[in-house]
Amino acid sequence: MFSINATFSQKENYASLLIPSALKEDANAVVRDNSIEITIEDVDAMTVLKKEVITVLNKLGDNYVSMSAHYDDDTKITELSATIYDAFGREIKKYKERDFLDVSAVSGGTLYSDSRVKYVDHTPVSYPYTVVFESEYKTSSTGFIPSWFPVESYFLSIEKSSYKLLNPKHFTIRKKEKNFHPYPIENTSTEFNVNYAIKNQKVVKYENNAPLSIDIMPYLLVGVNQFALKKIVGEATNWSEFGKWRYDYLKNGKDELSEAIKAKVRILVQGVTDPIEKAKIVYAFMQNKTRYISVQEGVGGWMPIPANEVDKVGYGDCKGLTNYTKTLLDAVGVKSHYAVIWAGAEQRDVDKDFFGMQGNHVILNIPNNGNDIWLECTSQTIPFGFLGDFTDDRNVLVMTPEGGIVKRTPAYKNETNLQEIKATILLEKNGSLSASLNRVSNGIQYDDKSHYERYTEEELIKNYKSNVWDYNNNLEITAVNLLNDKEKVVFKEDLKMTVKSYASVNEQEYLFRVNVFDKNGFIPKRYRSRKLPLKISRGYKDDTSYEFKLPEGYALSTLPSEKVLSTQFGTYKVTFTKIDDTTFNYHKSMVIRAGVYPKEAYNDYRSFRKSIAKYENLRIAINQK
């Protein structure tokens, strides 16, 4: 009989055959052991020891492997190694710290030269394989204590994961458990130490239109009330106190500008009394003067580069550019506040019930009599006061001189996320058509299309034919005019188009699909047994109106009756109006409403979208006179 243990001898056996079959089911990878041990030696001294053993079962599982460690002037790597094993647990390759590539964590600028990353770029030659990655670092920044994510992703099973925090000086520890039920998590924590573990957790399978993984899967937040960042000590018990400390921390010489640049922006706003109009002028100045380099919160520290440095070099990350814009606004007497947010299309919130170092991005808040204005300072093209899907509709921490405040950014959803199409369509006797179309987009639909103006003519035409209206064979674009109205945050498109052989023509009838330019055929995936809730992230409204002119020699007889679908998820309404014997109007209004719905509602939502998709293919037959 074949024996794995007889083949070789070592301390731990990482053969993939030893993984329980239940943990392999539907898994792309299996976490054999993921342990993190944190020791808070002092208010400004912390050691973090990590070990991750992961067996990758297929190519998709490669995404779960990360063999990298960040460091800077404040964080020192003291141990680093990685070992690769084959399916039988035999060692393939061992990387010591000297074998890791050592590169800058930031490209495109020199302001963050101390931020670096050591990593291994391993290319697997066969599956399964196992990675053992071990690291230890020491840091003086205790304001950010690593969180625990025992189930890090979909299609990833967990044999064992543990989290331990040792607190020999008995600092006050705060922790928050999220989504622990129904996961088999053991808690053996004491008053001053933290200890959690999970074992034999099967795969959580991804389902379309589900909430964020962070809203479903368990995680643990941990913090201390006495902490330090870059040797600057702080103490807080709530968001207000923490925000006040961070506000003072940010000041710390980072908001200084030369008198020359202050005089320059003051001249720009000379004669303007409205603070919002002043802010628009300053924001445009900043956009034209600077460019963005990507450095996340936490990488490159949490403190922005001084405003005068950003002014000098003309670039910065979100922290530097936001602080620079704030300092410019200070110079012209406009109040604004630095604000930290979780950025990304998935709309993750800053946890309003657990203060601490959260977020991966920074934006600027301008108080405006209860109607706050938010500025994205990393974009050279985004309109004043518009955020887009990167930072919309989520909790954000605003740092004010009086303290921290958790606010919410604007939501672009449902009817405010609007697309309107109006078109005149001429049907020709041979079955072709020509059309003049106007499309106006607001909200996230504006965000989706405003980049069109940066396309070349060739790229724009290709996009219309291959993406927007790919369901219309033989489409040709004969003229395009774009208008990005940044003042109203509206994107307008005027097009002239032809579609050859659009209709089916024979001696008996002339048959054509009535929804030419706004066909929505989305049908959610079918699940026999849905496990997760349904989430519609933003919602939207499409309002479409066509005036059809019939070919010469044809006349209308009857038009379809009104179609109305009304559900908790939204509404769909199509009406036809006869103008005369050769002209009629088609009007469609479709609203999809944002919300989180129970898993039992998923089939109803699918039926609703299926009915819409079917009616979007509605065809009309007309006859010769």
Image (cartoon, rainbow, N blue to C red):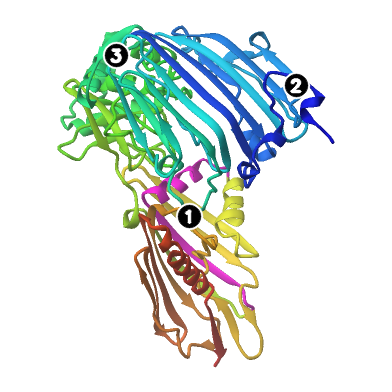
Residue 445 magenta-highlighted: yes
Magenta stretch: includes residue 606: no
Residue 293 point in image, percent of width and height: 48, 23
The magenta stretch spans which residues? 430-456
The answer to which image quadrant residue 104 occupies is top right
Q: Secondary structure at mark 1?
A: loop
Callout 1 amino acid: Lys
Q: Between residues 182 and 595, which one lies in front from this camera angle?
A: 182
Residue receiving disc 2: 91
| Residue beneath disc 1 | 531
Q: Secondary structure at mark 2?
A: strand
Residue topped by disc 3: 171
Q: Are marks 2 and 1 in contact (CB under 8 Å)?
A: no
In the image, taking residue 311 as reference, residue 250 lies left or right, namely left
Q: Is residue 76 toward the left or the right of residue 385 in the image?
A: right
Percent from the top left, x then y, of residue 474? Answer: 65, 64
Q: CA distance from mark 2 to mark 1?
A: 39 Å
Label 3 sits on a secondary structure element that is loop
